[in-house]
């Protein structure tokens, strides 16, 4: 059974479906337009063939004249007359096609606008999903930050009363010093961690274009930059 999508992802799925439908509709409009322009292209092609045949005949006449104009002049190829008729017919069809293409331009523009609007809507929907992905991470971070601060202050509570306990706990200053040293922990991202995080977000953005269930890759690891420094045991 497919898991139920949250609102932001459901909206994204709807936006993706709209983009797909708009693209398919635009493809049909373009296909129809290409059929219209093919009539114009046919006229251009036939006219080029006719011009080529006429140039070949003209060159044959030049060669005949240059050779002394002996005998009858070369006749135009049999195909030239047919090409001329075809070009005339194709020109009439091309003129009509040009008018049809101009009239059809409104449909092309409309389809393009529908696609652009659908794509923009998808981008907004994707933004909402990115926010949705970040929300639990923010909550986890805030909770961890709060627990860290609470634990830090609780541990250093002993340091705050160390003077009062000098007689009761001999060597307490050394102990609190050891505790402070052990608490000096400032982790940093593992090598390449920052780039890995950025790439994970980039992949998510790309995947959300057509997959409403795409998820963010795992967070990068961290290392202790001073782990190599020997710390005294707290004892």
Image: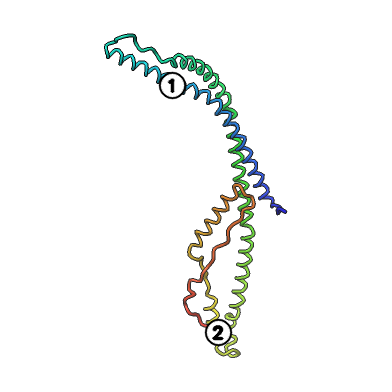
Image quadrant in which the N terminus is located: bottom right
- Which residue is tagged 1? 49
Mark 1 packing: few (<14 Cα in 10 Å), some, or many (20+)? some
How far apart in space, not on screen, are marks 1 and 2 (Cα)?
99 Å
174 up-or-down from 53: above or below: below
The residue that label 2 is drawn on is: 175
Q: Position of residue 69 (x, y in %)?
A: 29, 10
- Give SS at disc 2: helix
Instruction: Name the outermost residue toward the front.
Output: 71
x, y percentage for residue 134? 61, 57
* Residue reaching furthest to the right: 1
Q: Is residue 58 above or below residue 233?
A: above
Q: Nearer the viewer, residue 33 or 206?
A: 33
- Name the residue: 62% across, 43% down: 121
Q: Nearer the viewer, residue 120 or 89?
A: 89
Q: Quadrant of the C terminus?
A: bottom right
Instruction: Determine whether the residue tagged by mark 1 lies in a helix, strand or loop.
Output: helix
Q: Earlier in the sequence, mark 1 or mark 2?
A: 1
Q: Position of residue 87 (x, y in %)?
A: 48, 17
Q: Nearer the viewer, residue 25 or 226?
A: 25
- Residue 81 picture location, percent across and down: 45, 13
Instruction: Check disc 2: other Cα within 10 Å, few if <14, some if 14-19, many if 20+.
Output: some
Q: Which residue is drawn at the image coordinates 40% and 19% (left, top)?
A: 53
Question: In front: mark 1 or mark 2?
Answer: 1
Any mark on residue 145, and which? none
- Where residue 157 sits, quadrant-wise, is bottom right
């Amino acid at each position: 059974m497919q898991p139920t999508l949250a609102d932001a992802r459901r909206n994204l799925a709807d936006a993706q479906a709209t983009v797909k439908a708009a693209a398919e509709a635009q493809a049909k409009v373009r296909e129809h337009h290409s059929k219209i322009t093919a009539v114009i292209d046919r006229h251009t092609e036939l006219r080029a063939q006719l011009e080529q045949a006429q140039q070949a005949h003209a060159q044959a006449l030049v060669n005949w004249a240059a050779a002394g104009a002996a005998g009858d002049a070369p006749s135009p190829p049999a195909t030239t007359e047919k090409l001329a008729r075809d070009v005339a017919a194709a020109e009439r069809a091309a003129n009509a096609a040009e008018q049809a293409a101009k009239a059809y331009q409104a449909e092309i523009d409309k389809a393009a606008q529908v696609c652009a609007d659908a794509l923009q809507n998808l981008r907004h929907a994707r933004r909402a999903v990115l926010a949705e992905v970040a929300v639990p991470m923010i909550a986890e971070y805030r909770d961890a930050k709060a627990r860290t601060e609470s634990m830090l202050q609780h541990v250093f509570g002993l340091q705050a009363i160390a003077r009062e306990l000098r007689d009761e706990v001999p060597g307490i200053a050394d102990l609190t010093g050891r505790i402070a040293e052990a608490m000096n922990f400032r982790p940093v991202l593992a090598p390449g961690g920052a780039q890995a995080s950025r790439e994970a977000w980039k992949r998510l953005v790309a995947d959300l274009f057509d997959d409403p269930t795409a998820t963010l890759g795992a967070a990068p690891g961290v290392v202790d930059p001073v782990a190599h420094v020997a710390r005294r045991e707290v004892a």
